[in-house]
Image (cartoon, grey):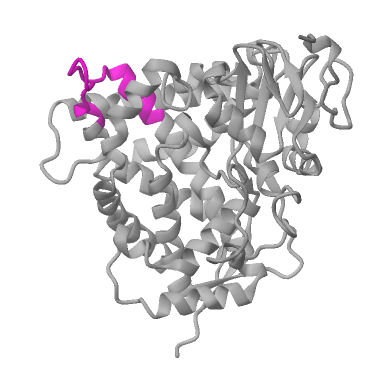
Amino acid sequence: MATAARLPAPPTAPGRLPLIGHALEMWRRPLEFLDSLTAYDQIVAVYLGPTPTYVLAGPEVVDRVMVADAGHFAKGRSFEKLRDYLGEGLATSEGPFHLRQRRRMQPAFHHRQIDHYARAMARLADERVASWQAGQVVDVTQEMFDLSLAIVTTTLFSTALDEHTAADIRHDVPVVLRGVYNRAIDPTGLGQKLPTPGNRRLAAAHDRLRRAIDHLIRTRRTGLPAEQPDLLSMLLQAQDADSGNTMTDQQVYDELITLLVAGTETVAGGLAWLFHELGRHPAVDRELHEELRTRSGEAPSFEHLGHLPYTRRVVDEALRVRNPGGVTMRRATTEVELAGYRFPPGAEFMFSALVLHRNPHHFHDPLRFNPDRWLPGQKAAPRGAFLPFGAGRHRCIGESFARAEMTTVVVAVARRWRLEPLPGAQVRGVMTSTNHPAKLLMRVAPREVR
């Protein structure tokens, strides 16, 4: 058998610099850099330092790494850096421990629970959009972040947080997200050891979040709510199927901080991009509103959200063309072969939904926002080509929650308002650990009454 050194290597993305490789591009303009990789069909090498990381650009290799041969891959070096902040939550844990935790948590995301959450989502979304005024200019990115944070904290903790705790969380979650992303792409690991203002802000924000969540766990241990249980209560009561043991406070904390971080900015970014696209495509906006107008009397529920086919296609297309997720890393634990290339144990791989979803080999006119590409009867995307919530054993456990939240918020906004882009405004995407638009200013316009 030929060794890896004797076989041809995948192509390398242009712009590699000595020592740091492409790390500067991933820090300064990550979305533009990732978008440039859609030109590649299967695998392309990027360097986050002196060694390569292989970007999986095709659905076949993504499916191999994430699903079919997942047993030959671990989560990789970026996840090791995240454990300082997210502990051993579902996003960072693996192996038997991950499987045990996932099984414990699965009942919290059952359809019956999502139905309960959807009612809270609808109430909070309606309250938010009712506070807007005709003609008002709103920062949609900030509005969606604040709304997503309110939804996540309400479903996690049932009752509204006291103002001090809520203010800490609103301030600290974005700081932690940005700090975590910077550390994940740091090729040297030296930046996190320096006493920079950014590192001090990150440490302080992480400490405040820790204290706030620990306090909520201790408080809830003293008495579970009598009403429909929230996520925190379900985590505290979740038992291991084999031993019957419940989670320790540390395990509950790790899962809560993961849900809080993952469930806030990712959904908020997806919603902000969705409203940006609706503003750019008035015909899509009108068809969406027409579907919602005919179903205006239905109460919010998980079942009701499933009866909005055009809304579902709009959400899917937003998740495709403007996927808010970041990057997912994997490390080969054995020698593996992908797309005709052989890689040694320890080789690092990167999966980005942005690269996969905008690959012209698999989506016609990939930059065009076209919900009708998801109509029944249209040519289906290849297996593994559309993975907005990941794949395999580490597929996002909160997918149904996130879809319910996005659909509920779209319904609340689009029934009442149109969000119109400001003339001449330039919209720039940014990445922390997620992809979201920077300050997205749009004008609130009332719907025409028929």
| Residue at point 30%, 44% (across, down) | 155
Tell me if I can see residue 161 in this picture: no
Q: Quadrant of the N terminus?
A: top right
| Residue at point 66%, 48% (across, down) | 357
The picture quadrant where one finds residue 130 is bottom left
Residues in magenta, as a range:
235-257
| Residue at point 42%, 68% (across, down) | 308
Q: Quadrant of the C terminus?
A: bottom left
In the rendering, at what x and y percent does residue 16 appear? Answer: 87, 26
Query: Who is closer to the viewer here, 40 or 220?
Result: 40
- Residue 241 included in the magenta stretch of the image: yes
Residue found at the very far bottom of the displayed protein? 450
Question: With 378 as the anchor, is 295 left or right in this view?
Answer: left
Query: Who is closer to the viewer here, 386 or 238?
Result: 386
Question: With 443 as the anchor, is 308 left or right in this view?
Answer: left
| Residue at point 74%, 18% (across, down) | 342
In the rendering, at what x and y percent does residue 6 appear? Answer: 85, 11
Indicate whether 392 appears above or below 248: below
Query: Who is closer to the viewer here, 51 or 337?
Result: 337
In the rendering, at what x and y percent does residue 230 appear? Answer: 24, 41
